[in-house]
């Protein structure tokens, strides 16, 4: 059978002016047998019904319209060593980014160009990328577990504009892992909301990341002083090498400040003043506070700086466990489920962190 299970392409389900496009990695056995896109059969159809999406008005397609033998996507890619050897004997170079599988084979490029042409023609408001290869074809990223649930932009020159992409797990992954059904429900609910417009809405935020001592008091005066007992102050510490490296405060969705405590950021007098400012805020009983796995933060602050966090403290990890005890409780999952935020953990690398919020 070679690289393909069946040498027959499963055509896309194209509709007029779709608001939502669903892209899967490749056809399933049943889709090849019936020569029809089933979109995960009853799972996706049921979720669409639950969130108010009419699947018959959605564009349905695959990144690859052929099914790889044994569902092994490696059949569509050259391993690094194979590609390196091929480049020695040929002038051909792949125009597509590398994936964990390697480099796309030349004959498979027609599938991606077909995909881009169909999207350019349909111009959906939002695209659900179901699987790592669908995500890669549209954005160049292939870590579906990292980007799942985020609202990100397409990043290929073959598309006629930047499209909103919501990565989600593939139908086969959902079949294998029952817990992923909630992730899928959350992602489709977000897609329904995002399908109202093609515009990508970015929150305007004011982030203070290299403050002076004067900045700490200015930020407090502008955004923390008048919180009262109804608006909470979020706080979060980061640790590495047995030290608290920084602490962040967010009094609202749009304003935040990070107080660094890396070794060379403050001169010693200013370092003491910065910790005194942090201590005064956290020990103020009139300020309602929010943290993720606050036991960790509170323990470290007490042990390292003798800061006794006082007042009402809400914990998002505990709240998630109470609400849905069978699901993940890490901050990354909560962010991907309840917000449109991207995978912020990929923006910086924190080594040796021991915080158990993952």
Image (cartoon, rainbow, N blue to C red):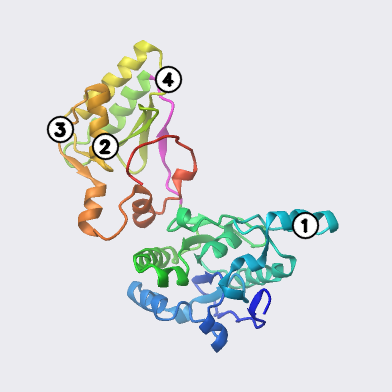
Q: Which residue is mark 2?
A: 296
Q: Which residue is mark 3?
A: 286
Q: Earlier in the sequence, mark 1 or mark 4?
A: 1
Q: Which residue is mark 1?
A: 93
Few, some or many residues within 10 Å of mark 4 (<14, 14–19, 20+): few
Q: Can you say whether 117 is above or below 211 in the image? A: below
* Mark identifier at residue 263: 4
- Coordinates of residue 215 in the picture (x, y in percent): 37, 23
In this view of the protein, can residue 230 be seen by the observer? yes
Magenta residues span 202-212
Classified by dominant secondary structure, the portion drawn in magenta counts as loop
- Residue at mark 3 to residue at mark 2: CA–CA distance: 22 Å
Q: Earlier in the sequence, mark 1 or mark 2?
A: 1
Few, some or many residues within 10 Å of mark 3 (<14, 14–19, 20+): some
Few, some or many residues within 10 Å of mark 1 (<14, 14–19, 20+): few
Residue ID at (26%, 37%): 296
- Residue at mark 3 to residue at mark 4: CA–CA distance: 32 Å
Few, some or many residues within 10 Å of mark 2 (<14, 14–19, 20+): some
Depth check: give the residue in front, 206 or 64.
64
Quadrant (top left, top right, bottom left, bottom right) of the N terminus: bottom right
């Amino acid at each position: 059978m070679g690289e393909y299970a069946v040498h027959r392409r499963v055509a896309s389900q194209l509709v007029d002016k779709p608001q939502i496009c669903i892209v899967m990695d490749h056809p399933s056995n049943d889709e090849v047998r019936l020569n029809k896109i089933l979109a995960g059969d009853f799972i996706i159809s049921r979720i669409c019904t639950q969130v108010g999406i009419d699947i018959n008005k959605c564009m349905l397609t695959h990144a690859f319209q052929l099914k790889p033998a044994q569902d092994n996507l490696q059949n569509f890619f050259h391993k690094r060593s194979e590609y390196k050897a091929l480049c020695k004997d040929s002038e051909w170079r792949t125009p597509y980014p590398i994936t964990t599988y390697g480099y796309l084979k030349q004959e498979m490029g027609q599938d991606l160009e077909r995909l881009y042409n169909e999207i350019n023609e349909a111009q959906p408001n939002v695209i659900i990328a179901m699987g790592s290869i669908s995500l890669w074809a549209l954005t160049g990223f292939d870590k579906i577990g990292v980007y799942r649930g985020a609202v990100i932009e397409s990043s290929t020159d073959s598309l006629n504009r930047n499209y909103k992409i919501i990565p989600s797990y593939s139908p086969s992954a959902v079949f294998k892992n029952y817990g992923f059904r909630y992730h899928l429900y959350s992602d489709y609910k977000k897609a329904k909301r995002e399908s109202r417009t093609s515009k990508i809405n970015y929150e305007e935020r004011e982030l203070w990341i290299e403050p002076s001592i004067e900045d700490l008091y200015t930020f407090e005066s502008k955004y923390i002083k008048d919180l009262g007992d109804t608006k909470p102050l979020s706080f979060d510490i980061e640790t590495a090498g047995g030290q608290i490296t920084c602490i962040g405060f967010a009094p609202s969705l749009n304003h935040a400040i990070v107080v660094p405590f890396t070794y060379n950021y403050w001169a010693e007098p200013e370092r003491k003043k910065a910790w005194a400012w942090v201590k005064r805020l956290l020990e103020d009983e009139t300020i309602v506070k929010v943290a993720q796995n606050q036991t960790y933060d509170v323990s470290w602050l007490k042990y390292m700086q003798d800061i006794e966090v006082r007042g009402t403290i809400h914990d998002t990890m505990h709240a998630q466990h109470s609400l849905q005890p069978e699901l993940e409780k890490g901050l990354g999952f909560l962010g991907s489920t309840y917000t449109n935020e991207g995978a912020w953990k990929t923006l910086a690398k924190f080594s040796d962190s021991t915080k158990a919020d993952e």
